[in-house]
Image (cartoon, helix red, strand yellow):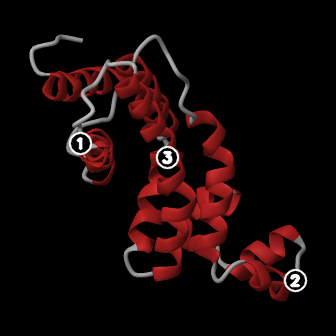
Amino acid sequence: MELAYEGGAQFATVERIAARSGVAKTSIYRRWPNAASIVMDAYLAELGPKIRYRRKSGVLESFIDSVRQLVVALKGPHGDLLRHLLGAAQSDPQLQKAFHENWIAPRRAQAMAVIEQAQADGELAASIDTDVLLDAIYGAVYFRLMIPYRKLSTTYVEKMVRQVFEGVAGHRRF
């Protein structure tokens, strides 16, 4: 992570990682296919605990809290590095697969559990497509991260999440 923060994801080569860690390159290659995968694993280990879903008094509050945590965690070098990793994943099928399996899928599973509980509690209609709902919320965050025409902020998070949930809940105001 130090190498990636020093010079970006591309600066963290297997050679530099081996030199910095004192581990042989052959040992590194037994576990990871490339340097980007190493950086991604380290990134997930560092950021993952900071962005866990915590059930709040309702589904809206749970999502506002979760998305707010993500946005706060992505400020500064974490967000810069995630942009680099997402860019690298577009031309690296192994990194793309690892990114999905280790970052996207576990977070979506946590989010779906929150939505399913809200549906079981009658807070959200059973007919809501959870994939579309998650894409609407997190797609907005990733869009602003990748195309930073405006800053990601906690104010934006609350407005955006409220508006998305008001859309799926119809007349009900959150």
In this rendering, the label closer to the viewer, 1 or 3: 3
Look at mark 2 in the image and give the residue it sits on: 24
Q: Which residue is painted at 63% across and 65% down in the image?
A: 39
- Residue 34's disc is none
Towards the viewer: 139 or 23: 139
Q: Which residue shows up at 39% across the image and 81% down it?
A: 91
Where residue 34 appears, x then y in whole percent?
63, 81
Q: Is residue 43 left or right of residue 158?
A: right
Residue drawn 39% across the image and 19% down it: 121
Displayed quadrant of residue 28: bottom right
N-terminal of the pair, mark 2 or mark 3, is: 2
Residue 67: x %, y % from top left? 41, 31
Q: Residues within 10 Å of mark 1 (few under 14, many from 20)?
A: some
Image quadrant containing the N terminus = bottom right
Q: Say if mark 1 contacts mark 3, CB within 8 Å.
A: no
Between disc 1 and disc 3, whose residue precedes? 3
Could you say whether the residue bearing mark 2 is in a helix, strand or loop? loop
Front in this rendered view, residue 81 or 61: 61
Question: Which residue is at the far bottom?
Answer: 26
The CA distance from mark 1 to mark 2 is 44 Å
Is the Cβ of the residue at disc 1 closer than 8 Å to that at disc 2? no
Tell me: 169 left or right of 111: left
* Disc 3 element: helix
Q: Is residue 75 visible?
A: no
Residue where numbered disc 3 is placed: 109
Residue 90 locus on image (x, y percent): 37, 75
> What mark, if any, has residue 136 been given in the picture?
1
Residue 19 in the image: above or below residue 67:
below
Disc 2 marks a residue whose amino acid type is Ala
Write down the quadrant of residue 116 in the picture.
Answer: top left
